[in-house]
Image (cartoon, grey):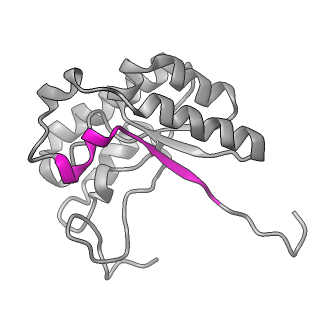
Amino acid sequence: MDKNSRLNAMTVDVEDYFHVSAFEKVIKPSDWDSLSIRVEDNTNRLLDLFQRKEVKCTFFTLGWVAKKCPELIKRIVNEGHELASHGLSHKRATLMSRGEFRADLWDSKNILEQVSGAKVIGYRAPSFSINETNTWVYDELQQAGFVYSSSTYPIQHDLYGVPNWPR
């Protein structure tokens, strides 16, 4: 890279509309199987665009999506993108006990690795839900073999953010 070029990072959270925290009070996980899945077509459209523009990306992917859309997961890896974990079912880390978090973390990692055949070393907590109340998460990530986490956000938001943490 020459001195005038700029390194950029691109990430995508691979989740469906009904997974997001904003809908957690109106759409229950038990209803997910009855809803139409949009994540596969939408992510394939992104993959097509990234391929045309020669962009590589990290895809923080739910284990739930990997179970439902295994061909999508294989395409992500086969096209040279990084596959990373976004948890199993988009439950915020701040709403789980340490044991629940550990099970969610391992389940998602195992599903992603089995479907893709690739090692998963990156993690992003749903809704950036790591803050000063659950820093034990970092020990769990390390024990599970993760190398990095993209799970904090140095701003204040209604669902996430730790404004006093460094950027």
Write down the region rendered in magenta.
Answer: 9-23
Residue at (12%, 26%) from the top-left corner?
30
Q: Is residue 118 above or below residue 139?
A: above
In the displayed structure, does residue 9 sit left or right of residue 158? right
In the displayed structure, does residue 53 sit left or right of residue 29? right
Instruction: Pick out the residue farthest to the bottom.
Output: 164
* Residue 133 location, quadrant: bottom left
Residue 91 in percent (x, y) is at: 21, 43
Residue 74 in percent (x, y) is at: 57, 21
Residue 95 in percent (x, y) is at: 13, 50
Instruction: Pick out the residue farthest to the front.
Output: 36
The N terminus: image quadrant: bottom right
Q: Is residue 87 magenta?
A: no
In the displayed structure, does residue 31 sit left or right of residue 122? left
Q: Is residue 15 magenta?
A: yes
Instruction: Pick out the residue farthest to the left.
Output: 25
Q: Is residue 58 above or below residue 47?
A: below
Q: How many marks?
A: 0
In front here: 57 or 107?
57
Residue at (61%, 24%) from the top-left corner?
75
Q: Is residue 48 above or below residue 125?
A: above
* Residue 19 location, quadrant: top left
Residue at (52%, 36%) from the top-left corner?
43
Q: Is residue 1 above or below residue 97?
A: below
